[in-house]
Amino acid sequence: MKGKETFRVYPGTPFCDIGECPYREAIARCYSRGWFLGMAATRFGPDRPLERAMLAAVLHRVAGCPQPPRRGLFFDVSPRSYCAQAANWCACQGILPGLGQGRFFPGRAVSWEELLLALWRWEGCPGGGEAPGEIWARAGGSPCPRTCSGPCPGGRPPRRWTAFSRPGDSCPPGRIG
């Protein structure tokens, strides 16, 4: 990947930069469902961090692109942006809210904890309403604040997540978005 550019298009996708990715088949499946569109016509960007705009766009597409009940919630998201409807919808659903003062921060990299919290909310807050940080702490990590706005110092993710990232890391490049 870095320093090893592959220029052959991966089957089932228009992407020429995922041939060496261990998760290329998952990317192809998500592309075939219309969830991942890539960074450009032939580039997925597997080495790029997942941004809040990307996460919102994917979750919105998976939900079938519903219309948000409110628009224009964030002054830092242009109404013409690819993520405008997605950011508004995710915020209205409580899945990926803004970060205060009318800001969504669409270009900010998603932390591991922020991804975990968004996916927990996406699933309807399973576990009897117990926040991911509480579940994480019970699994042997340190407590994570309910807002999960930053890394959880010294914490450890549940074993099943360790293949993806370490606490405090940005979401692994190309995983979603």
Image (tube, rainbow, N blue to C red):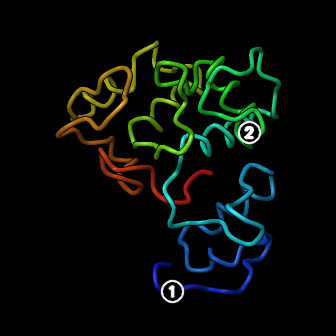
Residue at mark 2: 62
The answer to whether residue 110 is above or below residue 148 is below
Q: Earlier in the sequence, mark 1 or mark 2?
A: 1
Residue 47 % position (x, y):
50, 67
**Disc 2 residue type?**
Val
Query: What is the number of callouts on the image?
Result: 2
Q: What is the crowding at mark 2: few (fewer than 14 residues within 10 Å), some, or many (at least 20)?
A: some
Relative side of 160 to 31, left or right: left
What residue is drawn where x is 53% and y is 71%? 22
Residue at mark 1: 4
Measure the alpha-carbon separation of dots 1 and 2. 31 Å
Residue 147 % position (x, y):
38, 22
Q: What is the crowding at mark 1: few (fewer than 14 residues within 10 Å), some, or many (at least 20)?
A: few
Residue 150 % position (x, y):
32, 34
What residue is drawn where x is 78% and y is 68%? 41
**Disc 1 residue type?**
Lys
